[in-house]
Amino acid sequence: GRTGLVDTFMLDCDRCHAWFHGSCVGVTKDSLPDVWICDECTLQVMVLEQTQAFVERCSNHQKRRVKGTEEDSQKQKRHKKAKQKKDIAQANDVAGDQTEASDNVPEVDDTHIFRQLLLNYMTHLTETTKSQNIKFAREFHMAKWIQEFDNSRCVGPHDDAIRKESNFDAGLMCVHFLEQWKPAGGVSSSNDASVEKSTIKSSPQYLSEEGNSKLLLTLVATKSDLAAAFPRMLGVLVSLMGDDLVSLRKLAVKAIAQVINVDRTLMLHPSVRKAVSRRFRDEAISVREAAVSLVGSYVLQDPLVANAFHSSLLCRLTDSGVSVRKRAVKIFRDILLSNPNYGGRTA
């Protein structure tokens, strides 16, 4: 039955055992390694490694900053013997800060780690290909990230308080990328060399060209204006589900369905879940049918959705609209066929 795929070379991931076309992942029969890991598995491992390396870099940087403060205090002590007691008190305060340095590490989110992974790949290409175009692209991305962190430091008192609560240090992030500006050993401190090596060279593997393309697209999408405006746009759709016009309510339900089709976790978003549940009791049959159909598309994929909308679906079994009742019956039939031990069957 696989005669049509005789000439198609495929390989198995040694970690998750998923199958991939060799042409899609850039591997040929002649270059097949003894152990091959797919992009998804490689990314998971690399994210863990880079998170650890990033935390280590931040901790070392803060220790150096505390050490520098201690040295300044000692210089003042030598030149100002009259203030010896005060200098000792300051040194004790700094020592207390040093014990807290390891805990005062900025939070690491996926965006920072993905940026580091992309930087690792561009650094690897810069060193191996010696291409000026790749070098300029690498510097462009780094300059853009540094500018973003630098601009984030120009905030008001309210925003600054929020950043302190979230343990975010924009200055430290700037230093993190500035120290990697030079592709090969761009570190001025010998103490930082080991950290630089662990950050840049810790992973012998790199994502495939397709994997890095997806990584770049993810970064662009995360920081795009569309992504920033998504919560507001989702709020508009949710509000339209309660509009006075039946046609708008129905279209809003269908629009929400298209959004959830991309990210089904939104089905359990509090505002979305509440709005959809309300449409189950809409005065218009067409809107109720659209809401039931929306839920029915995901009850089999996610048991949490079935549990969340169980009571609402149960009420639609006695709906005045024939089409709504048929939809509800079909949904429960599919649930019971796929899961005969469904907990809601006796409810």
Image: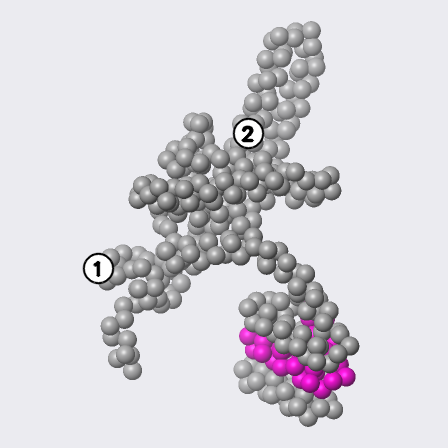
The x, y position of residue 165, in whole percent, is 68, 42
Q: Looking at the rendering, which quadrant does residue 152 occupy?
A: top right
Q: Which residue is mark 2?
A: 63
Residue name at image x 59 percent, y 44 percent: 107
Q: Is residue 277 visible?
A: no
In which quadrant will I find the N terminus?
bottom left
Range drawn in magenta: 272-301
Instruction: Say if 9 sits above or below 140 in the image.
Output: below
| Residue 312 drawn at (x, y percent) | 71, 80
Task: Please state if 236 lies on the left or on the right of 65 as rendered.
Answer: right
Observer-nearest of 267 and 215: 215
User: Considering the image in quadrants, where does the C terminus appear?
Assistant: bottom right
Give SS at disc 2. helix
- Say which residue appears at 58% left-offset and 35% top-offset: 171
The residue at 24%/57% (across/down) is: 31
The amino acid type found where label 1 is placed reads Asp
| Predominant secondary structure, magenta span | helix
- Say the numbered circle drawn on residue 132: none
